[in-house]
Image (cartoon, helix red, strand yellow):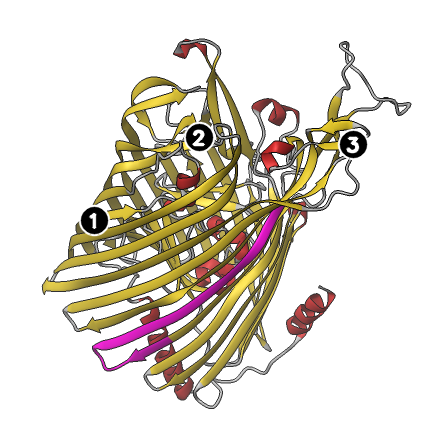
């Protein structure tokens, strides 16, 4: 680490002579940029297409990228709600779009799937500081265009890596702020060497103690690119990823615990008998030892290494035809380790252990759950473009091979205990798709859009799982072999004239169940695939003074998988397919620039999100609830900002509002997250330097008005009688940081 800081410091202090950009360098830059864009032509929506979309450029990302995870950087976009377990936006973070959870949001990098093939989630701390390497990103709301990987069932995020520069350049970035949050990042690029070659790389370290106690994050990441540009052809090898150690904080706090200490982390607490001042064990009135927290387990953490590798070949045949093909391979290797209090040994396949002539059947222990996985394949697209027609045809084929296994590492009171493996299972998943899409300008202002995708999935899971089955009295055995074939059509029309654009589209998407949908079930009660029909109707207007838009959406679900409140055979929360549900709403966007240095921005989403004819299960007792609100779906999400930029000084005052959300589908008032409003202020000054490109100083004043709020939570109910009036509830919440500061200095040379 000392070498890393020394390297960062040397680059920061280095000076380079400024040289005049030649006409040849400008020409080279245009060629490189043109061929780099071939990689995303197939899956990214054009601005005029009938897709609800928002984009961020590398400059816009860099202006706010002080070290937070990608979900935090997306918080300004319409319909986005961000969550963070540590309370700081670093470590275990996620985002929802239109209430859609992360397992239903498709994420790609250069067209390569980023979602975990089993859980369908993206674990952003596996690729820390990825924002520093993104050239641009586009968030498509709704089904969007056909893409690779898991089904986009509410949104898709496609990112591209930053194109290599044709000139020698570099940067060094340092951040520090509240909760010991810090970032050090160094990047350097060679420029074109010999007119054809270019290399570049980045090293980053991000750390934070977290707002929640012990919810620390320590992450290292890298990005390496090497490319050959030969006229109309680009061959690029890139590798990126990172290693993360994140202290677990996934339990949250009850309302009473928050009232006592909203920063408490119950994870890692070691429970044992309490002692008095003289060192004697305390006993209650019944003669039992008084139990309490006697310490914390230091290695109660998630540890993961992920290496993403891509070999990209792009070729422009002529002004009409271009080709992109990518081979990819991702290696994942990691585990999470935690201290568990008062555990039954039988749930770990272990027999009672004799200690001091006593058979011990339950005790405190340390367990480790590990996984190794390989994900590889190929994606390719062929693109055709004229003044009136844009055609893309794409295909992908991917294989996921993973193994899960768990061990009991230590036991309290057992000094000579040897680590014992208690479960192991394997997954093999095949995913292939074909798609073709056409954008046809049938008249001067009228475009028709059509998109058709075929997707095949084979998913196999076998072995022994970590869940203990109370019915059989043994660990759960897995034997899953499912195949899916999906055909997903999309149609749309766009009318554009004099800055006005009106559009409409209808699309169908289908999605396979996740791993948990297969493992957390009643015996033999396997889930079915989900289907959604998405209708979008929108209007946009753009001029020098104003940009405005309105988008109406209606997403109808058939067999959507939702948590019902039931418990599976292994005691886990059970998901079931509900026949009918929908999300509908309007998204409003507005940006006004009355002066070249002043901009007002605002976006608002007003929605209704309902399950029809819903039956809630409490302690296995069914209660018909009729039409209910889908969990984690606020009816109002809004954001606004005032931006000021003049003579190198930039200021952005932003406000986010998220309406109240139910934490279950039963629509109970006592199982609800309260609405919240958070204001942030970003200040920056760019200092021109004679021997450097620029030096930028920035400071982020987050949660400016010290709001106490929770962005996420979970809960459930139980019965103390036989009727709904006898229902009682429990809930846990994830408090977010109050006022905090993060400062940054970035040197570009």
Residue drawn at the location 31% of the way across and 19% of the way down: 625
Query: With respect to residue 29, does 75 lie above or below?
Result: above
Front residue of 169/422: it is 422
Give the residue pinned by disc 3.
Answer: 355
On-image quarter of the C terminus: bottom right
**Left or right: 434, with 715 as reference point:** left
Q: Secondary structure at mark 1?
A: strand
Magenta segment's dominant SS is strand
**Left or right: 87, with 108 as reference point:** right
Q: Which of the numbered marks, if any, corresponds to residue 568? A: 2
Residue farthest toward the bottom in the current orientation of the protein = 194
Tell me if mark 1 has few (under 14), some (14-19) or many (20+) residues whose alpha carbon lies within 10 angstroms of its own.
many
Which numbered mark, 2 or 3, is in the foreground of this view? 3
On-image quarter of the N terminus: bottom right
Q: Is residue 315 magenta?
A: yes
Q: Which of the numbered marks, if any, corresponds to residue 507? A: 1
Q: Position of residue 730 (x, y in %)?
A: 52, 22
Label located before the other in sequence (1 or 2) = 1
Query: With respect to residue 61, does 420 lie above or below?
Result: above
**Left or right: 741, with 570 as reference point:** right
Residue farthest toward the left in the current orientation of the protein = 443
Q: Is residue 728 magenta?
A: no
CA gap, disc 1 to disc 3?
A: 64 Å
Q: Which residues are magenta?
A: 313-337
CA gap, disc 2 to disc 3?
A: 34 Å
Do the residues under discs 2 and 3 have CB atoms within 8 angstroms? no
Query: With respect to residue 130, does 550 lie above or below?
Result: above
Q: Position of residue 130 (x, y in %)?
A: 50, 60
Instruction: Quadrant for residue 573, please give it.
Output: top left
């Amino acid at each position: 680490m000392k070498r890393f800081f020394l390297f960062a410091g040397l680059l920061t202090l280095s000076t380079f002579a400024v040289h005049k950009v030649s006409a040849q360098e400008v020409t080279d830059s245009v060629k490189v940029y043109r061929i780099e864009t071939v990689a995303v032509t197939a899956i990214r929506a054009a601005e005029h297409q009938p897709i609800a979309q928002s984009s961020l450029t590398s400059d816009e990302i860099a202006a706010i990228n002080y070290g937070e995870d990608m979900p935090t950087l997306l918080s300004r976009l319409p319909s986005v709600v961000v969550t963070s377990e540590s309370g700081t936006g670093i470590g275990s973070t996620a985002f929802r779009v239109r209430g859609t959870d992360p397992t239903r949001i498709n994420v790609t990098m250069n067209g390569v799937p980023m979602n975990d093939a089993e859980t369908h989630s993206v674990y952003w701390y596996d690729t820390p500081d990825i924002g520093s390497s993104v050239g641009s990103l586009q968030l498509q709301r709704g089904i969007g265009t056909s893409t690779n990987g898991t089904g986009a069932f509410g949104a898709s995020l496609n990112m591209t890596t930053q194109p290599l520069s044709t000139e020698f350049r570099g940067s060094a970035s340092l951040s520090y702020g509240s909760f010991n949050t810090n970032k050090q990042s160094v990047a350097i690029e060679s420029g074109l060497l010999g007119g054809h070659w270019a290399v570049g790389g980045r090293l980053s370290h991000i750390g934070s103690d977290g707002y929640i106690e012990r919810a620390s994050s320590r992450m290292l990441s890298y990005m390496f690119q090497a490319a050959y540009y030969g006229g109309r052809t680009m061959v690029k090898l890139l590798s990126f990823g990172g290693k993360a150690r994140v202290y677990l904080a996934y339990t949250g706090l009850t309302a009473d615990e928050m009232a006592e200490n909203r920063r408490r982390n119950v994870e890692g607490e070691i429970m044992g008998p309490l002692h008095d001042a003289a060192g004697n064990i305390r006993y209650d009135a019944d003669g039992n030892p008084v139990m309490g927290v006697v310490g914390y387990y230091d290695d109660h953490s998630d540890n993961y290494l992920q290496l993403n590798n891509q070999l990209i070949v792009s070729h422009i045949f002529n002004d009409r035809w271009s080709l992109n093909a990518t081979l990819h391979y991702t290696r994942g290797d990691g585990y999470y380790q935690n201290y568990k209090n008062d555990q039954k040994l039988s749930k770990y396949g272990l027999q009672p252990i004799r200690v001091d002539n006593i058979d011990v059947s339950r005790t405190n222990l340390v367990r480790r759950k590990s996984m190794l996985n390989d994900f590889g394949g190929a994606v390719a697209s062929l693109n055709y473009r004229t003044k009136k027609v844009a055609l893309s045809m794409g295909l992908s084929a991917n294989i996921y091979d993973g193994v899960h296994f768990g061990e009991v590492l230590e036991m309290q009171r057992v000094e000579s205990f040897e680590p014992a493996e208690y479960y192991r299972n394997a997954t093999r998943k095949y995913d292939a798709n074909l798609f073709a899409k056409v954008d046809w300008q049938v008249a001067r202002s009228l475009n028709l859009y059509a998109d058709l995708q075929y997707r095949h999935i084979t998913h196999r899971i076998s072995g022994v799982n970590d869940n203990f089955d109370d019915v059989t009295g043994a660990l759960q055995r897995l034997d899953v072999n499912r195949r899916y074939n999906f055909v997903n059509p999309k149609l749309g029309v766009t009318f554009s004239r004099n800055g006005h654009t009106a559009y409409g589209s209808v699309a169908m998407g289908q999605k396979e169940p996740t791993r948990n949908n297969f493992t957390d079930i009643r015996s033999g009660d396997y889930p079915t695939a989900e289907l959604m029909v998405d209708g979008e109707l929108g209007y946009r207007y753009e001029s020098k003074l104003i940009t405005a838009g309105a988008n109406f959406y209606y997403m109808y679900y058939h067999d959507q998988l939702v948590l019902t409140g039931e418990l599976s055979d292994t005691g886990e929360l059970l998901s079931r397919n509900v026949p009918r549900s929908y999300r509908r709403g309007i998204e409003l966007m507005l940006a006004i620039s009355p002066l070249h240095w002043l901009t007002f921005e605002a976006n608002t989403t007003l929605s209704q999100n309902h399950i029809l004819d819903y039956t809630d299960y409490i302690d296995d007792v069914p209660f018909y609830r009729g039409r209910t609100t889908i969990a984690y779906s606020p009816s109002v999400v809004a954001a606004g900002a005032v931006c000021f930029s003049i003579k190198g000084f930039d200021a952005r005052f932003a406000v986010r509002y998220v309406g109240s959300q139910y934490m279950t589908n039963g629509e109970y008032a006592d199982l609800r997250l309260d609405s919240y409003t958070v204001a942030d202020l970003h200040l920056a000054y760019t200092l021109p330097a004679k021997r450097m490109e620029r030096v930028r100083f920035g400071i982020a004043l987050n949660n400016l008005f010290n709001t106490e709020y929770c962005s996420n939570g979970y809960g459930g109910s139980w019965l103390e009688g036989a009727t709904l009036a006898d229902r009682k509830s429990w809930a846990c919440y994830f408090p977010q940081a109050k006022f905090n500061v993060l400062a940054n200095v970035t040197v570009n040379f």
